[in-house]
Amino acid sequence: MTTSDQQFRSLDEKSLVDYIKSTPSLSSVVGTSDNLVVKEVGDGNLNFVFIVSSPSSSLVIKQALPYIRCIGESWPMTKERAYFEATTLKEHGRLCPAHVPEVYHFDRPMSLIGMRYLAPPHIILRKGLIAGIEYPLLAEHMAEYMSKTLFYTSLLYTTTTEHKRAVAEFCGNVELCRLTEQVVFSDPYKVSEYNRWTSPHLDNDAVAVREDNVLKLEVAQLKSMFCERTQALIHGDLHTGSVMVTQDSTQVIDPEFSFYGPMGFDIGALLGNLMLAFFAQDGHATEENDRKAYKKWILRTIEETWNLFHKKFIALWDEHKDGSGEAYLPQIYNNPDVWQLIQTKYLRDLLHDSLGFGSAKMTRRIVGVAHVEDFESITDANKRADCERKALNFAKTLLKERRKFVSIDEVVSTMQQADP
Amino acid sequence: MTTSDQQFRSLDEKSLVDYIKSTPSLSSVVGTSDNLVVKEVGDGNLNFVFIVSSPSSSLVIKQALPYIRCIGESWPMTKERAYFEATTLKEHGRLCPAHVPEVYHFDRPMSLIGMRYLAPPHIILRKGLIAGIEYPLLAEHMAEYMSKTLFYTSLLYTTTTEHKRAVAEFCGNVELCRLTEQVVFSDPYKVSEYNRWTSPHLDNDAVAVREDNVLKLEVAQLKSMFCERTQALIHGDLHTGSVMVTQDSTQVIDPEFSFYGPMGFDIGALLGNLMLAFFAQDGHATEENDRKAYKKWILRTIEETWNLFHKKFIALWDEHKDGSGEAYLPQIYNNPDVWQLIQTKYLRDLLHDSLGFGSAKMTRRIVGVAHVEDFESITDANKRADCERKALNFAKTLLKERRKFVSIDEVVSTMQQADP
């Protein structure tokens, strides 16, 4: 047992109050009065989350336990993930403060983060998408978050020295990387006790995924890129459950899977989960609301997210082309033609990576261990299976054909054809 | 000044003898008698190298100084490179003892390695290639070395946990990586005080390299791969000056540039330098020896090196497919068709990477800072320039067209056409 283990104790509503009272960086936010109210609200798969409120203000406490909460002590998982989550919250928050909640406090031995409470009407984006709520600034905000966090942590902006130092540090988050490798890139393509799907409806579809050699070849390449390519400090789990929204606020939370990986894994997670939301809409349609207009909004949001990301990323690159980034030296890439050539190639490749990872993220949510509420909340199994099958078939096509797309518009057209 | 700096002192012939006498792992090899003979033989760019001999045996001492030897204290370079060199010598030596000299001793504060003396007739391979000597086992041995060191340190064999631990450690060799980035991927493509070429003969050729947008786009992608892809523990400088040979022995030395990078960087370094040797032969032809037969041997060696590497690498992969490697789980890649699909794709991509890096290595030796003796020893500047131009033009074509090649035979045919 290490010192760190000895200093760890899991907190409950009661002991948390004492902890806060004795921690100035937290008590300065909510005070030390006797009427602190603590509510455990963790609905995620991994951690405990508490909202602590005084009459005048609130904060959130997140504590990682040394196993996966939704499965229990039988699936151990290092609580050191909290260190990487806190580090990335602070780093991404520094780069994009408008869309990352502030960290007030981090206690490494306790694997405990104290952070800004995202007050109502903030809700998890996924729940908003299920409810059919439009978020007019979502694409703009997510493009802002992704372009800043990915650009500034890549070799387009940093030096090799800083890059390798940071890569080395985040190699420490290996257990969470392994979990992603298993649940995203492995389990859905083999027989696994953890896999599940809408049965018997999708039984044959699940078998087809496991028997599709070309699909498995493509997945292998994505997995290699995930394991080997240290392109930027990525969030690592940027699905619609890791984003909290209101009509004018967008906040990215839960980067405990963060590490230096391929940018397309973040962009693909977001796009892929918006695609899942799209294919789930028919299951949420009612006589009053056929969701047709909402589906159009989702498609527009997918398009705008990529296009705005593209625009902002290029703008950052142009702005910093004479900066400290070592990938493309201005003395080499020294004329407008070559500058356009490299940017076009970089963003084209990134689109293809994103579509690939997005596809893999969709597939694993339909035939893998962890499903999404977009589909799970469709109670009619026939309806749910229809939605899931459309999404799965689209994901398979997208993964195999992604290199043919030169713009997101073409992807969206293909989605419409897949769901006429 | 750190403790490590305080414990460092550069050794000369005299102080080295005292050092050896007080170091059991060295004195057990050469003894402690008063007739130890020390000879400084470092002809490389970076370090001091001594041969220490007693009447009965010898060893080599290599000491890194905190700057680049051939340039002087004006170009500082961490002496910590010796740590990575020793670590990789030991690791690659464990994986392929037949082709890596044994390390007797490593002193980190002193940046000093004591290792096996490669006795005559061992010579540097590059010198043998200039002299026109055939090495019938060279291809076999280098294929053996590369297949074992690259396979066993990749995710085809190791777990993600072990891989990320090792990647993190070798991130520490960042200064040597930066040097490669500069001299291989940057300087040749821009105006740099360090660049030189056979002038005025190649003046226009050097300008053409700097003005070739497509070439620079390709180089950018190779540089990104070099900086971002942690595929295996590569030697990092595997040219023909890093190999010592006799008719039946092949020994790989000097892995101070080693880190987790793309496999193709090692394979390409070797193939690219064999290609340079090929294009230099006309400059070494005499009335007695037109070098035509020797050129054929070099081409055969290039072909055999790749083909034997391919065969051995696949054999290792097949042998360990049920092992601990996490890249391709046997439960997923579970039929002969998909197995062949992934292996063909992996090796095809690796060939293309190798040809790309090989091209970049050729170009930088003709218009960059560090040249090769293959060309430098051609005293007639006209002749030298002719050889260099052929090599440079071939390298440019190979870099741009490499994805069209499906076998090494086609590459060799193209070389023959480039040098009719």
Image (cartoon, coloured by chain):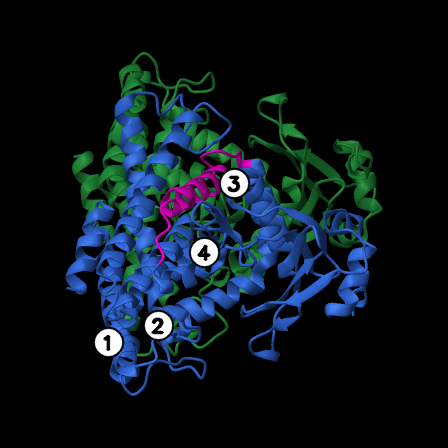
Chain colours: A blue, B green
Comparing B73 with A339, the one in front is A339
Q: Which amino acid, mark 4?
A: Leu
Between the C-alphas of marks 1 and 3, the distance is: 39 Å
Q: Residue at x 70, y 50 (%)?
A: A56
**Gap in angstroms between the C-alphas marked 1 and 2:** 10 Å
Q: Quadrant of the N terminus of chain A?
A: bottom right
Residues beneath discs 4 and 2 located on the same chain? yes
Tell me the residue that label 1 is attached to: A386
In the rendered image, residue A142 lying in the magenta stretch gets the answer: yes
| Mark 4 or 1, closer to the camera | 1
Q: Which residue is mark 4?
A: A238
Q: Position of residue A141 (x, y in %)?
A: 42, 43
Direction from residue B135 to residue B36 in the image, left or right: right
Kind of residue sitting beneath label 3? Ala
Q: Which residues are magenta?
A: A133-160
- Which amino acid, by three-letter code, is at mark 1? Asp
Which numbered marker is on residue A375? Answer: 2
- For mark 1, give the secondary structure: helix
Residue shown at 44% from the left, 36% from the top: B127
Mark 4 or mark 1: name the one nearer the start of the chain. 4
Measured from the top left, where is residue B251 in percent x and y? 51, 51
Secondary structure state at the residue bearing disc 3:
helix
Q: Is residue A167 left or right of residue A125?
A: right
Q: Name the mark nearer the viewer: 3 or 4.
A: 3
Q: Earlier in the sequence, mark 3 or mark 4?
A: 3
Query: Reading the chain from its start, which is encountered first: label 1 or label 2?
Result: 2
Q: Chain of mark 3?
A: A
| Horizontal and vertical percent position of residue B336 | 27, 77
Q: Which residue does the numbered mark 3 point to in the structure image?
A: A98
- Neighbor class of circle 3 (other Cα within 10 Å; few <14, some 14-19, many 20+) is some
